[in-house]
Amino acid sequence: MPALPDDSLKAMQGRIVELEIGLTHQQHLAAQLDEVVVEQTRQLMRLERSMLQLQRQLKELRGDQKERQIDPLEERPPHY
């Protein structure tokens, strides 16, 4: 294989350095995005737990309300 001229070699080395820099930036960006996804997943899990708890509380309140509900036809007026 013939030797490359110095200008060609320097140009290729420069391109390789630029590619390595670009790759490093991409890796850093991917790591940052991964952190965001992990945090959003945690937040989503917390919200789902909260929603389930609120749904249970609402169901309990509705059940309590039905138990307390008095049929107006069976209720005696206060003056009796």
Image: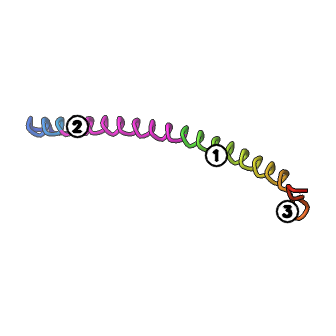
Separation of residues labelled 1 and 3 (CA atoms): 34 Å
Residue located farthest toward the bottom when viewing the structure as drawn: 73
Label 3 secondary element:
loop
Magenta stretch bounds: 15-41
In this rendering, position of residue 12 left or right of residue 51? left
Which x, y percent locates residue 57?
A: 72, 44
**What colouring does the structure picture have?**
rainbow
In this rendering, position of residue 62 left or right of residue 43? right
Which x, y percent locates residue 24?
A: 31, 34
Label 1 secondary element:
helix
Q: What's the residue type where badge 3 is placed?
A: Pro
Mark 3 or mark 2, which is nearer to you? 3
Label 2 secondary element:
helix
Locate the N terminus and report the quarter of the image it occupies: top left
Residue 51, which numbered label?
1
Residue 63 versus residue 8: which sits nearer the camera? 63
The residue indicated by pointer 3 is 72
Separation of residues labelled 3 and 2 (CA atoms): 85 Å
Label whose residue precedes the other's in the sequence (1 or 3): 1
Residue displayed at 16% across by 36% down = 14
Mark 1 or mark 3, which is nearer to you? 3
Residue 79 versus residue 42: which sits nearer the camera? 79
Q: Residues within 10 Å of mark 2 (few under 14, many from 20)?
A: few
Q: Is residue 66 above or below residue 38?
A: below
Q: Is residue 76 above or below residue 25?
A: below
Label whose residue precedes the other's in the sequence (2 or 1): 2
Magenta-span inclusion, residue 32: yes
The residue indicated by pointer 2 is 16
Magenta-span inclusion, residue 20: yes
Residue displayed at 41% across by 35% down = 31
